[in-house]
Amino acid sequence: MTSTHTELPSYPLEAPASAALLDRALAVIPGGVNSPVRAVRAVGGTPRFMASAAGPWLTDVDGRRYVDLIGSWGPMILGHAHPSVVEAVRETATRGFSFGTPSENEVALAEEIVARTPAEQVRLVNSGTEATMTAIRLARGYTGRSVVVKFAGCYHGHVDSLLAAAGSGVATFGLPDSAGVPASSAAETIVLPYNDLAAVEAAFAARGHEIACVITEAAAGNMGVVPPVEGFTEGLLRIAHGHGAFVVSDEVMTGFRCSPSGWYGLEGPYASGPPDLFTFGKVMGGGFPAAAFGGRADVMALLAPTGPVYQAGTLSGNPVATAAGLATLRGCAPEVYERLGVVSRAIAEGVSEGLGREGVPHTVQWAGSMFSVFFREGPVRNYDDARAQSTEAFAAFFHAMLSQGVHLPPSSFEAWFVSAAHDDEAVDHVLASVPDACRAAARGFATIDA
């Protein structure tokens, strides 16, 4: 990361090959994408269809190269196509893709997760949604209760009962709930403001005997990065346990990225003990569909085949996916986390300084090396705070960065991710792109004021 001049591309907003692929996709895929945020409707324009990735770089089907600050929404902690992960996948794939029986890789990955976290046992699944869905089923099965407490702006996958004020793509499109969710499911969910222990106390005072669990993002990343205020997690544990309810800590995003033990490794241990259940994903799959949930052995014993709570998955513990996850976790040496910190600080500080010079209101918030730039004055402590920002200014900033070869998350309600592969060339490229983008953001604010 030097102060030398970096020659930047100047890409036009049009992307003909991507636009042609989008037209094809729209004919056969709803909205042309298989996950809503990818449609980039929050910022406008044509989503870039990617052809390849290596290290910190993405290359789209138009042949344009970008520094990647999405990282597949978190999994690519070592960078794209890391040699050790590629070799683990190649070697495993040559021996078969899926067996429909147990295999050693799933045992090894479970051992790695248990060694890093307070979870005594874990069950591997295919997605974060599966992990949170089953963790809640398990909490209900153990407690014999049905009501779930969640927080506005926290996203826990597209589970019916959790798609209420869910942040992420839902926040981006201004949809507080989803059509198709039965009223009976919504009635089993209590939505409270994040970081508000008084609201939690009141909910348990009124309905504590009905509440099976509180589910919370360990540090919120789906309304932008909003960490828990000091004492919030400890308070959740104290209140929930005092009423015989569980706390489910969703570390799908933060797990193994914030630290070798996720957010728990930064904030724990807690006086009230660890959360009863954890959910994991993203980094633990190394870019493949893999996730997990886990907790105390006596709780996990309720899962079939040893107990009455049913969960199954044909591809759960897939040997290729677990090989990628295991290689990724084993590659996360201390120097990886050190590099994540250096890179994320350099980029965030460069953006903040640039926005400051242009007089653009903003605040930067952190969860380990994950960060978000909110286009408003801080602090941001909950969903309402997060929504009180200029999405127009962010859109202008996004497109200015994209035109110079930097791909940001296409929503102001998302975390920015870096990898250990972001070398000085990539960081310098990002920093050299910042001044023009900050001027664009300033013009976005001026347009609003006018």
Image: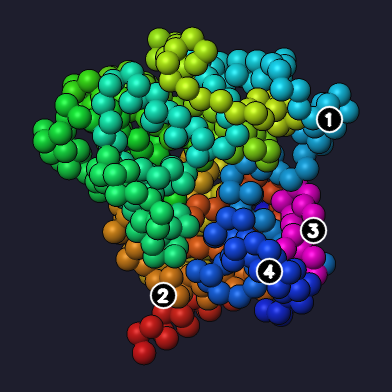
Instruction: Identify the magenta region.
Output: 49-62
Q: Which residue is mark 3?
A: 51
Image quadrant in which the N terminus is located? bottom right
* Residue 50 drawn in magenta: yes
Q: Which residue is mark 4?
A: 27
Mark 3, other Cα within 10 Å: few <14 / some 14–19 / many ≥20: few
Mark 4, other Cα within 10 Å: few <14 / some 14–19 / many ≥20: few
Work out whether mark 4 precedes mark 2 in sequence or the reverse, and give the earlier one: 4
- Nearest to the eye among marks 1 and 3: give it: 1
Mark 1, other Cα within 10 Å: few <14 / some 14–19 / many ≥20: some
Instruction: Name the residue located 60 percent from the left edge and 34 percent from the top edge.
Output: 126
- Left or right? Give the position of 391 relative to 379: right
Total labels drawn: 4
Instruction: Name the residue located 49 percent from the left edge and 75 percent from the top edge.
Output: 441
Q: Which residue is mark 1?
A: 93
Secondary structure of the magenta portion, mostly? Answer: strand
- Left or right? Give the position of 10 relative to 343: right
- At label 2, the amino acid type is Gly
Mark 2, other Cα within 10 Å: few <14 / some 14–19 / many ≥20: some
- At label 3, the amino acid type is Ala
Work out whether mark 3 precedes mark 4 in sequence or the reverse, and give the earlier one: 4
Q: Are marks 2 and 1 in contact (CB under 8 Å)?
A: no
Image quadrant in which the C terminus is located? bottom left
Instruction: Name the residue located 71 percent from the left edge and 79 percent from the top edge.
Output: 14
Q: Which residue is mark 2?
A: 359
Per the image, label 1 sits on a secondary structure element best described as helix
Work out whether mark 4 precedes mark 1 in sequence or the reverse, and give the earlier one: 4
Relative image position of residue 210 (x, y in whole percent): 20, 29
Q: Tell which of 352 and 231 is nearer to you.
A: 231
- Nearest to the eye among marks 2 and 1: give it: 1
- At label 1, the amino acid type is Ala
